Amino acid sequence: MTSAHHLVVITGANRGFGASVSHSYLRHSGASAISFVLVGRNEQGLATVLHALQEEARTSSGAVTVKGVVVGNVDLADTEHLEKNLERIQVAVAQLRDEASQSKSAISKSVLVNNAGSLGDLTKTAKEFTWQEARRYFDFNVVSLVGLCSTFLKDTQAAFPKETYPEHRTVIVSVSSLLAVQAFSNWGLYAAGKAARDRFLGVMALEEKSNNVKTLNYAPGPLDNEMQADVRRTLGDAEQLEIYDGMHKSGKLVKMDDSSSKLVLLLKKDEYTTGAHIDFYDE
């Protein structure tokens, strides 16, 4: 077991894929200590996830130390309060950094997983969207991501300057989709948002490649979760709907823990090209 101490921020962590990523990180990252910052709308749900992580760490044979802070009641779609919510996340991250420093357990890797996001209205074709709908959608799915990534990276580099901490690594992940690289009917806002997130992290990868920073756009596949159920209830394209219904009925949707485990193992092996788009189904 490595002596690595990882600081891991996950948005949308109170349920679904975000919660799954947190558990997979505990099980597969190889870290001996993990400080989690769990961000989401449901504070009680976040507290439940953190407690489950701490219990799993306590009862497992892996001897992983888990600490954490929850930052609840965070609606990243609410740009009026975005600055305040980003500051709350900053405070939580700084608290765990300070605790690690005081305990002489140096943080060797800082990770941000941008999981929070929404589908948009899948009943509509591209010509039916209004600019008001588009602005609301991109405020949540793109604008908040830009703010969180830039804030996280600047704070991390200030806390761990390369000259003083040459071994520290920073990783920023965006939960992406096949829709970021391939168009399908009725996914106009979702596809555009995922493509924008991919490209933003691609640019960041180029700009920061000499600063011990890597980015990854990870498409988790068609997950067997609540969001996929929403897709099957609302998608306006009959051909796609038939495919998704068939996958659901035949049990071929991707299990969340299978996909989140693949993500964490990708980060652990660290063989991916920074800025890459990697799909669950990729070899």
Image (tube, grey):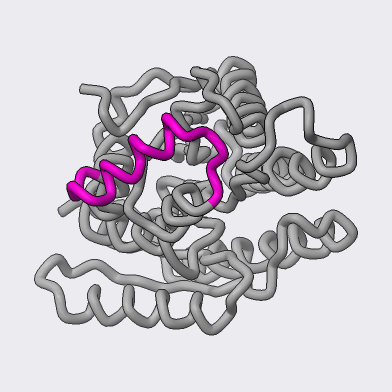
**Position in image of residue 275 (x %, y %):** 50, 21
In the rendered image, the quadrant that contains the C terminus is: top left
Residue 147 within the segment the image draws in magenta: no
Q: Residue at x 69, y 60 (%)?
A: 90
- Percent coordinates x, y for residue 32 in the rendering: 26, 60
Q: Nearer the viewer, residue 30 or 244?
A: 244
Q: Farthest residue in the left direction?
A: 61
Q: How many marks?
A: 0
219 vs 91, left or right, is: left
Task: Please indicate whether residue 16 sits to the left or right of residue 193 in the image.
Answer: left
Left of 72 or right of it: where is 219? left
Q: Quadrant of residue 240?
A: top left
Q: What are the residue bounds of the magenta stretch?
A: 234-252
Residue drawn at point x = 10 percent, y = 71 percent: 61
Q: Position of residue 194 (x, y in %)?
A: 59, 32
In the rendered image, the residue lying farthest to the front is 238
* Secondary structure mostly seen in the magenta stretch: helix
> Which x, y percent locates residue 60?
14, 73
Q: Nearer the viewer, residue 152 or 147?
A: 147
Residue 51 in view:
yes
Q: Quadrant of the N terminus?
A: bottom left
In the displayed structure, 48 sits above or below 92; it is below
Most foreground residue, 46 or 30? 46
Q: Nearer the viewer, residue 105 or 198?
A: 198
Question: Compared with residue 268, is residue 45 higher up or lower down, i.e. above or below?
Answer: below
Quarter of image, res 160: top right
Q: Residue at x 63, y 19 (%)?
A: 203
Point 79% across, 45% down: residue = 139
240 falls in the magenta region: yes
Instruction: Please say whether residue 221 is visible from this viewpoint.
Output: no
